[in-house]
Image (spheres, helix red, strand yellow):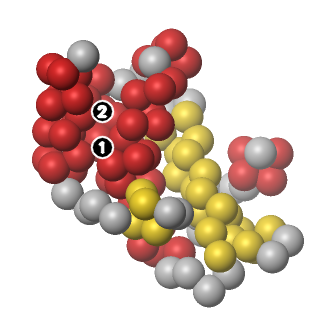
Amino acid sequence: MKIVTNRRKDYTHFLEYKNMKLVFRRYASLYFVAGVDANDNEMAYNEVIHLFVECLDEYFGSVCELDLVYQFWKLEMIADEIFLGGEIQETSRSVVVNRLRQLDEEE
């Protein structure tokens, strides 16, 4: 985290770290970091981080740090809807959020 948080704003959001690439984005005081294979398309993961944050924002209605801390299982649910076996599965925000709302209704 020290490498990511100390990175200058005018640098790219991609870093080579050991045998992988770190792709990260900052939203207010939150950093979202993905460790991806060195051969993966870092721009695709940059966009999927943005999709993840958009889903969080739509689902929680202006997401904040407390939502992430106290409802961590919902982050996992969103990640499960977007990723399957570490690969990007779903790229539609409306599909992800609608599925989560369906799961909430079933509870």
* Depicted 1 relative to depicted 91: above or below: above
**Which residue appears at 60% of the width and 57% of the height?**
34
Q: Position of residue 104 (x, y in %)?
A: 22, 22
**Which residue appears at 62% of the width and 69% of the height?**
36
Horizontally, residue 57 falls left or right of residue 99, namely right
Q: Are marks 1 and 2 in contact (CB under 8 Å)?
A: yes
The image quadrant that residue 92 belongs to is: bottom left
Q: Is residue 9 visible?
A: yes
The image quadrant that residue 69 belongs to is: top right
The image quadrant that residue 2 belongs to is: top right
**Which residue appears at 14% of the width and 39% of the height?**
98
> Camera-side residue: 93 or 101?
101
Quadrant holding the C terminus: top left
Quadrant holding the N terminus: top right
Query: How many numbered dots are placed on residues in this image?
Result: 2
Secondary structure at numbered mark 2: helix
Q: Is residue 11 visible?
A: no
Name the kind of residue labelled 2 in the image.
Asp
Q: Position of residue 74 (x, y in %)?
A: 40, 28
* Depicted 66 relative to depicted 10: above or below: above
Q: Which mark is residue 54?
A: 1
Give the residue pinned by disc 2.
57
Horizontally, residue 4 falls left or right of residue 93, namely right
Q: Position of residue 10 (x, y in %)?
A: 60, 62
> Camera-side residue: 83 or 27?
83
Name the kind of residue labelled 1 in the image.
Glu
Mark 2 surroundings within 10 Å by alpha-carbon count, few (fewer than 14), some (14 through 19), many (20 or more): some
* Depicted 45 relative to depicted 95: above or below: below
> Camera-side residue: 87 or 18?
87
Horizontally, residue 36 falls left or right of residue 71, namely right
